[in-house]
Amino acid sequence: MNAFLTLQRLRAMLAALLLLALLPRMAPAAVPNKDAVPAYAEEQTILQTEKDVREPGWGTAASGKVHIDRHFLGQYGSSEGNVILQRGGNTWRTLRNGPIATVSGVLLLVVPLLILGFYLTAGPARLAEPESGRSVTRFSSWERTVHWATAISFLVLAFTGLVILFGKKLLLPWMGAEVFSWIAIISKYLHNFVGPLFILCSVLMFFTFLDRNFFNRRDWQWVKAGGGLASHKHVPAGFFNAGEKLWFWGGVTLLGLVMSISGLILDFVTFGQTRFVLQMANFLHLGGATLYMLAAMGHIYMGTLGDPHAYRAMRYGSVDETWAREHHEYWLAERKDTQG
């Protein structure tokens, strides 16, 4: 009888110990305050995915990436076709839609206002003497074709790029999802297809106008006088003045290269670019595009409202001799010497 009671006691003790061991696993895990941790859902998804794929033949998530076997997704040509999650994507999205978009938007609003203020204060360029009535050829038909092809492709890219960057916040609320979706799709495809055309036009423009855009000591006089933009003082220059040369090298060449290279990386994603490379290219593309548009605003102003004769030169190819003498005196003198 005593042996039987002892056996019963041992069984009860073992059952109690087993229950104590299982209780932690049966109790629900403590869940942090989701409102206090905005990234809770994303982190839980990443952790759960990491747990699910920790098997032989699967990658690890130690670097912030969760992989699957290349046989599933690697066939599509991307070096990261096997990456499901990448934590850096959230950082990229936050920066792109936050500080970068804000700074870009502010600059694109402020600079036109500054240009308008300058125009109302200084007014357009004025000739010191009446027009002579004698025309001087300034640009050939080829030069004007290259210029306008580059300008038009740039304007298409600028407009569609602004829709892509700001459309969701500025257009969608009052336009509605259905209409905006069509505008967004059209903008996307126009941007992707016109981009390579803009690169080709930029290359043609570079070689077409290269020989007339090298700096010389006379350009420094133009810079010191501010080009006479505010004072309307006569400042002699060659075929292109220092301001136009700065636009050529800083805008068309340098920013054009930044936008072209980063744009090609983003446009053709099947050449092994990692997501990190694509994100960095996107940052460079947005920054380069913003600076290019700001510089282009100054260039467009000086070629239209700021100096209507300059627009006439690129529109029709010729200018009045008085304008040529007051704005590009060195070029006019060299041209006359060449003609004998």
Image (spheres, grey):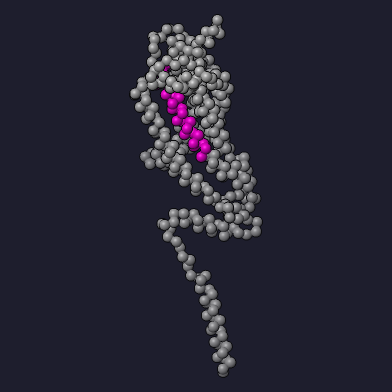
Tell me if residue 260 comes above or below residue 54 in the rendering. above
Residue beneath the point at 45% across and 24% down? 299
Residue beneath the point at 62% across and 40% down? 271
Tell me if residue 135 comes above or below residue 48 in the rendering. above
- Magenta region, mostly helix, strand or loop? helix
Q: Is residue 128 visible?
A: yes
The region drawn magenta spans: 283-309
- Place of residue 75 in the rendered image (x, y in percent of width and height, measured from the top left): 64, 46
Residue beneath the point at 43% across and 38% down? 103
Between residues 299 and 185, which one lies in front from this camera angle? 299
Left or right: residue 265 compared with residue 98: right
Image quarter for residue 277?
top right
- Place of residue 74 in the rendered image (x, y in percent of width and height, measured from the top left): 63, 47
Rendered-image quadrant of the N terminus: bottom right
Total tally of numbered discs in the picture = 0
Residue 288 lies within the magenta run: yes
Tell me if residue 21 comes above or below residue 121 in the rendering. below
- Place of residue 80 in the rendered image (x, y in percent of width and height, measured from the top left): 60, 47
* Residue furthest to the bottom: 1
Residue beneath the point at 54% across and 28% down? 253
Between residues 47 and 338, which one lies in front from this camera angle? 338
- Place of residue 2 in the rendered image (x, y in percent of width and height, measured from the top left): 56, 94
Between residues 301 and 148, which one lies in front from this camera angle? 301
* Residue furthest to the top: 340
Rendered-image quadrant of the C terminus: top right
Q: Is residue 317 visible?
A: no
Image quarter for residue 278?
top right
Image quarter for residue 254?
top right
Residue 190 lies within the magenta run: no
Between residues 278 and 214, which one lies in front from this camera angle? 214
